[in-house]
Amino acid sequence: MTTIDPTPIVQVRNIKKVYPGGVEALSDISLDFPEGKLTTLLGPSGCGKTTLLKIVAGLLKPSSGDVLVDGRPITGPGPERAFVFQDFALMPWATVIRNAAFGLELAGVNRSEREAVAEKYLNTVGLKGFENKYPHELSGGMRQRVGLARALAVNAKVLLMDEPFSAVDEQTRRKFQEDMLSLVKDEKKTFIFVTHSIEEAVYVSDRIVLLHRRPSRVSQIIEPQIARNVDPEMIRRQPEYLDAVENIWQSLKKFLD
Ligand SMILES: Nc1ncnc2c1ncn2[C@@H]1O[C@H](COP(=O)(O)OP(=O)(O)O)[C@@H](O)[C@H]1O
Ligand SMILES: [Mg+2]
């Protein structure tokens, strides 16, 4: 197996999280997230994936341990990290372009400049022509893309994506997964992706972190050796893809109650 060795942009050091009431969501997690790669947190519902992502985002404080970005401990949210929410988090009263440009609006970027950037990323996510629509005029999958365009527009180095494709139908989901591969290739960012789908994890990830439940800890790290410079349709037919899916299932199965 080849090992991924770029600079770890995000480092999670001995993170423990006990929620008020005593639920120990994370036990002792240490992980590095390299630049230009997509790392997936994979594990059953309740294993602490969202908790870990929120801690990395700075939206939730760990009970102990640190998160370092570029070697410096974080103390809260920061512009270098963008969170793509599971439930879209769009403003219903604002147009698609305003929603996509919202992060830049908050940062004080002037209107023509922020709309130009937002337009570029709406194009990237396949929403050219929808700039002046409102969220209720879009499908779930399209709303999800606006959320992604917003995260890309602020040019964050780290993209935190919590089950971003969970609310869309199977066809749209597959299309998104293909798009993710091009995004990872084209945008030199650190992607931290959460899913409970083994197939999705193997398809999109350079590295998969298997999380074990109660208390949650890292049980295994897998780097699927899949050729990605092929027709995206062919990826799911590779023996390496099918083996990785099966091996992960066997590993996760051991931890089922
Ligand atoms: N705000 C909270 N208060 C108390 N317990 C919580 C809270 N949020 C999550 N938990 C618990 O922490 C554990 C991990 O939750 P979560 O991070 O949402 O898991 P996942 O995203 O993997 O499904 C679960 O047992 C969940 O019930
Ligand atoms: Mg979750």
Image (cartoon, rainbow, N blue to C red):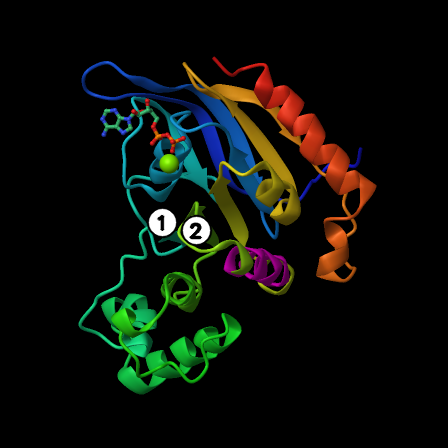
Q: Which residue is drawn at 28% across and 16% down?
A: 23
Q: Is mark 2 on a helix, strand or loop?
A: loop
Neighbour class for label 1 at 10 Å: few (<14), some, many (≥20)? some
- The residue at which mark 2 appears reads as 164
Image spot of residue 69 (x, y percent): 45, 43
Q: Residue at x 47, y 12 (%)?
A: 257
Magenta-colored span = 172-183
For residue 155, the mark is: none
Q: Which residue is drawn at 52% across and 49% down?
A: 191
Q: Main secondary structure of the magenta part?
A: helix
Looking at the picture, tell me which residue is in the foreground, 166 or 181.
Answer: 166
Coordinates of residue 219 in the picture (x, y in percent): 57, 20
**Three-letter code for the amino acid on which mark 2 is drawn:** Pro
Position in image of residue 8 (x %, y %): 57, 41
Does the segment drawn in magenta span residue 235?
no
Numbered disc total = 2
Quarter of the picture holding the N terminus = top right
| Lateral position of residue 1 relative to residue 107, left or right | right
Q: Is residue 61 visible?
A: yes
Residue labelled with disc 1? 86
Image quarter for ligand 1: top left
Q: In this view, does 243 lie above or below 174?
A: above
Determine whether, in the image, residue 7 is placed left or right of residue 145. Answer: right
Residue 63, image x, y percentages: 29, 22
Quick one: label 2, few (<14), some, or many (20+) residues within 10 Å? many
Between 237 and 102, the residue placed more toward the observer is: 237
- In three-dimensional space, the C-alpha distance between marks 1 and 2, rounded to whole angstroms, equals 5 Å
Q: Which amino acid does label 1 sit on?
A: Gln
- Quarter assignment of residue 66: top left
Q: Is mark 1 on a helix, strand or loop?
A: loop
- Can residue 8 be spotted in the picture? no
